[in-house]
Amino acid sequence: MSKTVRVVENILSANDRIAARNRGLLDKSKVVAVNIMASPGAGKTSTILATFERLKQDGIRLGIIEGDLASSIDADKAIAQGIPAVQINTGCCCHLESHEMQEALDQMPLDEIDLLVVENVGNLVCPTWWNLGEHLRVLIASVPEGDDKPYKYPVMYKGVDAVIINKTDLLPYIDFNMDYFKEGVEILNPGLVTFPISAKTGEGMDAWVEWLKTAIAETHEAGTPASAD
Ligand SMILES: Nc1nc2c(ncn2[C@@H]2O[C@H](COP(=O)(O)OP(=O)(O)O)[C@@H](O)[C@H]2O)c(=O)[nH]1
Ligand SMILES: [Mg+2]
Ligand SMILES: [Zn+2]
């Protein structure tokens, strides 16, 4: 095995160790964490905020960790909605790592949160390699990016629990074959659930939010031994 490969493996296993600690802290605090990944501009922030509006009505207590190369623009939007938010600026790094998640968790009021959303750095290449300790991973694709993205970025599609296809309000204006897109997803990740939505109009949001609520409840059940209650 070459030296370079060993160094990369060591970095990833160090990342996994901190991720396991993060998961332990989340489980202890009964917080479900969802890692949201997508290319820049797919609509991560818009989808998250539209989702939060709905979850708030169900009394679900929310928090968000925002990963960006620079700026606090997205965290400021969440704070304006009254959501506890921590911004991580990665400088020139193209993904979030578990030690950054750990630092953000230290600043979060975990006892007052049921669902913690992590908006990862906009990038379709590597974020799924980096375990943060999250329970669920969701990839957001969007109509203007094109229907061939599962075929071109297979690693991302293999590493997630659900795919959102955002900006369906633009379907009349853009050549996007939904069947072709979904076939690509099915080849890579058989049975993976997909949610066509428009964060702008609200179309499709109900099905996505229902899935998320069920996933939160199931994660809570799995993470809580029967004797603890
Ligand atoms: N037409 C349309 N535009 C959207 C939708 N969702 C987000 N956008 C726009 O796409 C751009 C990027 O959105 P943003 O949420 O910041 O994406 P992010 O970079 O992935 O967080 C903004 O101009 C949004 O207004 C949608 O469902 N339909
Ligand atoms: Mg954003
Ligand atoms: Zn990266």
Image (cartoon, grey):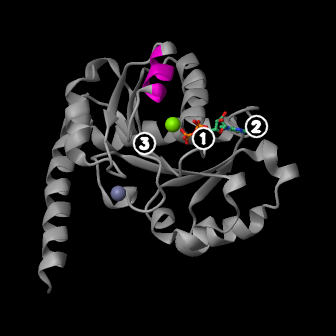
Q: Which residue is mark 2?
A: 203
Amino acid type indicated by mark 1: Gly
Which of 2/18 is in front?
2
How many marks the image carries: the answer is: 3
Q: Marks 3 and 2, how far apart in space?
A: 25 Å
Which of disc 2 and disc 3 is earlier in sequence?
A: 2
Query: Which residues lie in the magenta part?
Result: 73-79
Query: Which of the two marks, 1 or 3, is nearer to us in this view?
Result: 1
Crowdedness near tag 1: few (<14), some (14–19) or many (≥20) residues, C-alpha within 10 Å: many
Displayed-image quarter of ligand 3 = bottom left
Quarter of the C terminus within the rendering? top left
Q: Secondary structure at mark 1?
A: loop
Q: Residue at x 50, y 17 (%)?
A: 59
The Cα–Cα distance between marks 1 and 3, rounded to whole angstroms, is 26 Å
Which residue shows up at 55% across the image and 20% down it?
58
What x and y, as percent, mark residue 29? 24, 28
| Residue 67 image offset from top left, x and y in percent | 38, 39
Instruction: Name the residue beneath numbered marker 3.
Output: 218
Type of amino acid at the residue the image marks with label 3: Glu
Q: Quadrant of residue 3?
A: bottom left
Decide if ligand 1 comes within 8 Å of the CB at mark 1.
yes
Reading the image, the residue beneath label 1 is 43
Q: From this viewpoint, is residue 30 visible?
A: yes
Residue 100 against residue 153 in the figure, above or below: above
Q: In the rendered image of this protein, does residue 13 appear above or below residue 138?
A: below
Pointer 2 residue Cβ closer than 8 Å to ligand 1: no
Mark 2 and mark 1: span between their CA atoms? 14 Å
Foreground mark, 3 or 2, reads 2
